[in-house]
Image: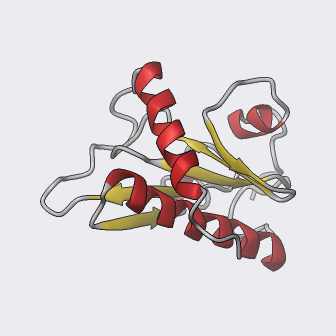
């Protein structure tokens, strides 16, 4: 496995070099909207530590990513009236991971509505802003665990 690349897209987002549509943040994690969503409300949860994937993150850091992902999932289901949620995590290029910084995809789903293909279209910034606002409001009623 190659070493962590501190110039990857998510590392740059964590350093504030690239903007994001932030949903929530704590000492260990950051959650924001995916700019190429597969469903309305598709969010990403990343650790603030340097970890390529599940193979090199500490158990404690991954546990916090999982806790934040659950909270974001609950908010996404509420904010978008979803029937369920898909949570995905890919580690290393052979699995399909594109950005080599651990991230969890949190995608609210509606029965009978297919997810869009991965990386198939960039969402309009106005819609991302509206979805971010909906998620932030919904997070207000999801307890922090």
Does 99 appear above or below 18? Answer: below
Q: Nearer the viewer, residue 61 or 91?
A: 61
Q: Nearer the viewer, residue 22 or 14?
A: 22
Does 66 appear above or below 132? Answer: below
Relative image position of residue 136 (x, y in whole percent):
58, 46
Left or right of residue 117, residue 101 in this image: right
Q: Residue drawn 68% across and 49% down?
A: 24
Instruction: Give the tally of numbered discs.
Output: 0
- Residue at the extreme left: 112
Specify the quadrant that holds the C terminus: bottom right
Does 82 appear above or below 35? Answer: below
- Could you tell me if residue 90 is visible in this image? no
Left or right of residue 8, residue 6 in this image: right
Q: Residue drawn 40% across and 36% down?
A: 119
Relative image position of residue 129 (x, y in whole percent):
51, 28
- Could you tell me if residue 57 is visible in this image? yes
The chosen color scheme is secondary structure
Relative image position of residue 74 (x, y in whole percent):
49, 66
Q: Quadrant of residue 8?
A: top right
Q: Quadrant of residue 28?
A: bottom right
Relative image position of residue 21 (x, y in whole percent):
60, 33
Specify the quadrant that holds the N terminus: bottom right
Left or right of residue 2, residue 104 in this image: left
Q: Residue drawn 40% across and 60% down?
A: 78
Q: Residue drawn 58% across and 57% down?
A: 139
Left or right of residue 132, residue 100 in this image: right
């Amino acid at each position: 496995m190659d070493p962590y690349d501190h110039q990857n897209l998510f590392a740059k987002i964590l350093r504030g070099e690239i903007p994001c549509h932030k949903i929530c943040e704590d000492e260990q994690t950051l959650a924001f909207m995916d700019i190429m969503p597969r469903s309305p409300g598709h969010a990403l949860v990343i650790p603030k530590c340097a970890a390529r994937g599940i193979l090199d993150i500490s158990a404690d850091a991954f546990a916090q990513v999982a806790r934040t992902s659950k909270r974001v999932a609950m908010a996404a289901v509420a904010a978008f009236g979803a029937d369920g949620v898909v949570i995905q995590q890919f580690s290393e290029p052979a699995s399909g991971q594109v950005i080599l910084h651990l991230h969890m995809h949190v995608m609210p789903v509606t029965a009978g509505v297919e997810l869009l293909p991965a990386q198939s279209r960039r969402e309009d910034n106005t819609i991302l802003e509206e979805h971010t606002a909906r998620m932030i409001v919904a997070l207000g009623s999801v307890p922090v665990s």
